[in-house]
Image (cartoon, grey):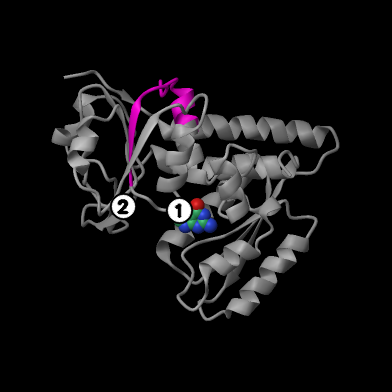
Amino acid sequence: MADYTLIDGKAISEQVKQEIAAEVTEMVANGGKRPHLAAILVGHDGGSETYVAAKVKACEACGFKSSLIRYESDVTEEELLEKVRELNADNDVDGFIVQLPLPDHISEQKVIETIDYRKDVDGFHPINVGRMSIGLPCYVSATPNGIIELLKRYQIETSGKKCVVLGRSNIVGKPMAALMMQKGYPGDATVTVCHSRSRDLVKECQEADIIIAALGQPNFVTADMVKEGAVIIDVGTTRVPSDKTKSGFKLTGDVRFDEVAPKCAFITPVPGGVGPMTIVSLMKNTLLAGKKAIY
Ligand code: GUN
């Protein structure tokens, strides 16, 4: 039974926010302007409301200006695209996001591709995704970037390690795999991506030095799937109904933490692991946008 290190995403995220706030204070003292993040929220989905509120709050903590633009879920695609074009042209806005998911009658891809890639602080535009995959400066999407930051801050060795990414989503699995195989630290890993059609997923996990679980299936990773001394990053945040919490649900990861943790060298909890880092990554991208550091 190994003595594991709990990767404290909450504490690291607070630290990064303070670092950003200090930089913003200096920028303003030198006559610069505060970075400005705008967010578009369509409808009243509970998860999206929570995430956007957390993003606005993080902007305040970092000393950023933020704007929240709301639409009812019957907004037309063209209305939304017109707002995106307006934000593209607004010189006061450094970066902006359109919170996903969008209602079915609106093409998320069309919206993402209408965002000027130079203001795409979510890193979802194909230009940013493409540049990321070939190691060029770009906005990297928030969750993978947050995980990279955690690996760095805990100085977790990745070179030559066997890394299994569970899940192939455009937002997490695919970019995560690309970053882990990139030249240099924290990359240089041998990466396998497993998904719902994978054969031998359990065997792949059993051989992994690092598992990044991003399937969105609560408690999927069990102790028998994990080798002694592995590093476990849990990206899952499924809201499982619960009568034990005030909100009526419990945020549940993809990893069965209680049984897996004793076998690990490092593990992230849910909540308090990857989640807080995701928002901080968006703040880092917004700071870069404010400084025009990439484009
Ligand atoms: N929905 C879930 N995660 C995200 C995110 O990182 N950005 C946006 N815009 N929407 C999301």
Q: Nearer the viewer, residue 169 or 103?
A: 169
- The C terminus - image quarter: top right
Residue under the point 58% across and 52% down? 56
Disc 1 residue type (three-letter): Asn
Q: Is residue 102 above or below residue 279?
A: below
Q: Alpha-carbon neighbours of circle 1 within 10 Å: few (<14), some, or many (≥20)?
A: few
Q: Nearer the viewer, residue 179 or 122?
A: 179
Q: Is residue 102 above or below residue 4?
A: below
Residue under the point 80% across and 56% down? 91
Residue 196, quarter of the rendered image: bottom left
**Label 2 vs 1, first from the N-terminus:** 1
Q: Is residue 267 above or below residue 122?
A: above
Residue 138 lies left or right of residue 169; in this view the side is right
Q: What range is drawn magenta here?
A: 149-166
Q: Nearer the viewer, residue 69 or 57?
A: 69
Whether residue 275 appears in this view of the structure is: yes
Q: Position of residue 204 (x, y in %)?
A: 23, 36
Q: Residue furthest left?
A: 224
From the image, state whether disc 2 or disc 1 is nearer to you: 1
Whether residue 258 appears in this view of the structure is: no
- The N terminus - image quarter: top left
Quickly name the residue at label 2.
216
Residue 271, quarter of the rendered image: top left
Q: Position of residue 129 (x, y in %)?
A: 56, 49
Residue 175 lies left or right of residue 254; in this view the side is right
Give the number of marks: 2
Disc 2 residue type (three-letter): Gly
Q: Position of residue 117 (x, y in %)?
A: 67, 54
Q: Position of residue 228 (x, y in %)?
A: 20, 23
Quickly name the residue at label 1.
170
